[in-house]
Image (spheres, grey):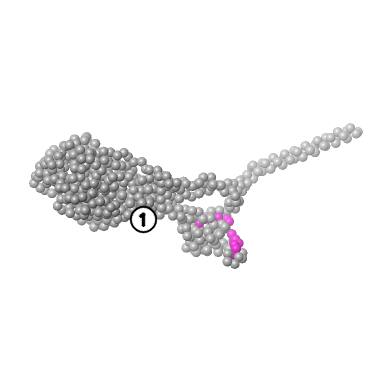
Amino acid sequence: MKSKRHRRERQWRLIVPLGLIITMLVIFCGRLFDLQVLSAAAINEEADGRRGVVNSLWTTRGSIVDAEGRPLATSVDRFDITIAPVNMVDFNRSNPKTGETEVVTVDDSLQRIAKITGQDAKTLRAEIDAILAEDPDANFAYLARMVPLEQYQEIRKLRIPWVYPQPHPKRSYPAGAVAGNIVGFSDAAGEPLAGLELQYDKCLAGANGKEMYERSADGVAIPGTVVTVEKPRPGGTLELTIDSDVQYRVQQILAEQVTYQQAEYGTITVVNVKTGEIVAAAEYPTVDPNVPTDANPDDRGNRTFGAALEPGSIMKPLTAAMLYDQGKVDPHETITVPDQWPHDDASFGDHESHAPIEMNLNGVLAVSSNVGTAEFGSRLSREVRYDYMRKFGLAEPTAVGFSGEAAGTVHAPEDWDSQTNYTVTFGQGLTATAAQMASAYQAIGNGGKRLPLKLVRGCREEDGTLTEIPGGESVQVVSPEAARLAIDGMEAMARAPGHEDLAVPGYRVATKSGTAQTVNPETGTYYQGTYYTTMAGLAPADDPQFAVLVGMYRPTRMVTGSGSTPVAWQQTMSYVLAKYQVPPSPEPYPEIDARY
């Protein structure tokens, strides 16, 4: 009996612990099933309020500055005022004047914010109530967007716990329309849309940083958990060659003359002959980047680099330089020049009828004879002239590489018909931009050496490092002697009777006017009675420092380059020479052999 009782007791001692273990296993498995299956969604939703949150650290877009460091584009601080509607409650705050605790209601808070931002408090409350009605757990909403720094600071002083200002930089253009066609503009969100803003976005944009923190269920960051994962990198500063003082003055000159000449638009390009740097690239009408929609859509781009037109007679000094470089003409040699082209099946003539005249090449340039230029120019083969035009930088974008820049057109010599074979010598049958022609004149003024045009010096990082913008290679287009002789012909034109309005007191100037018919882009035929007029030149002629090119598109008051452009050219060159304190030309001026 005793042994049976002992066996039963031993069995119970084993069964009870085993039962407890099995019971615990059942409970554990049940709980595990509940956590992983039945309650998983609810648990995950609760954990969302506690897990790590990644937040952006805003950076600042870099500035665009002129050659002297003056800002043309910059970023100003703006802030979005956001709230967590689900956390929007009355709160206690100590009155700084009395030291007593006071209750600040939701409506009080909204009224104070609305007073600062100029909004209506009742409208704000209605909008928030609508958000909560749709989603009672909404933890994000805007109260105001893009408020200035002063308003942001006032809102911070209110110390409302459920209000979260977020930085939102806004683009500003303190110089307004000065260099607007160059700088470009951005949209309301700060995204670049045009000009250098778009072209050099990689330099200017910088990179936002990241921070991570743990948040509680109510969305508030848990103290001590904020960690900066990646520091923000501010955008670089884009340094230009443009002098905003010159740009401003030249835009004034251009606006006055485009209006007076009743032209559709105009451009003035100023280039430093010794460096290839663009000092000014004015256009009118232009665009104010602060309000780009105020400008006509056709005026929001850039025509200095984007509009390729027939250059007309400002091509003639380039032809002269080619001839001198090849030794095909002597500056004192004369030929008989009729007023109409007598050879092949080409048809063109000089601007005014005249009896056959003995002219040398300086005389041809002085009176801008098409027939004389073609007579001399045809001494060079098509292929040679084509190669020179390419060396002068025609038919390819400049080293600036401006966004949307046109290459212009110079057809291959084997595609020239008889007319084109001769007319290219005086700027018809090809197209070029104002920037390309200004670059060609820089080459003539620089002893025949064409330097890459430069509009941007580089991108300066926050640490002061300047990353220069790579340009093209310098090209010795013609010899210094050939360039010098071409300048003599231009000076002969500037000193010819009737061109007194080109004179800059104290300086020798070398100029060439141009008049070209405008072309219908759809048919390729010339419009009758409408012209693109130009004036290109160098000063001082004895040691050129600056090249200035003026262009007027379809002027109606005076329709030739020698009539519509001299005032703008003379005023621009006079200002530039004075601004940079260029020494006057030595006396006496030499006599130039110009026979016509």
Pinpoint residue 125: horizontal percent, then vertical percent: 53, 61
Total marks shown come to 1
Q: Residue at 21% of width from left, 35% of height from top?
A: 384
Pinpoint residue 233: horizontal percent, then vertical percent: 47, 46
Q: Amino acid at mark 1?
A: Ala
- How crowded is the residue under tag 1: few (<14 C-alpha within 10 Å), some, or many (20+)? some
| Quarter of the image that includes the N terminus | top right
**Going by the picture, which residue comes out furthest to the left?**
355
Pinpoint residue 222: horizontal percent, then vertical percent: 60, 51
**Going by the picture, which residue comes out furthest to the right?**
1
In the foreground, 227 or 131: 227
Pinpoint residue 389: horizontal percent, then vertical percent: 24, 39
Does residue 265 show up? Answer: no
Q: Residue at 33% of width from left, 46% of height from top?
A: 455
Does residue 571 show up? Answer: yes
Mark 1 secondary-structure assignment: loop
* Image position of 234 (left or right of 333): right
* Image position of 22 (left or right of 170): right
In the foreground, 517 or 458: 458
**Going by the picture, which residue comes out furthest to the top?**
3
Considering only vertical position in the picture, is 29 above or below 513? Answer: above
**Going by the picture, which residue comes out furthest to the bottom?**
98
* Image position of 459 (left or right of 24): left
Image: magenta residue range = 81-95
Q: Which residue is mark 1?
A: 175
92 in the magenta segment: yes
16 in the magenta segment: no
In the foreground, 305 or 575: 575
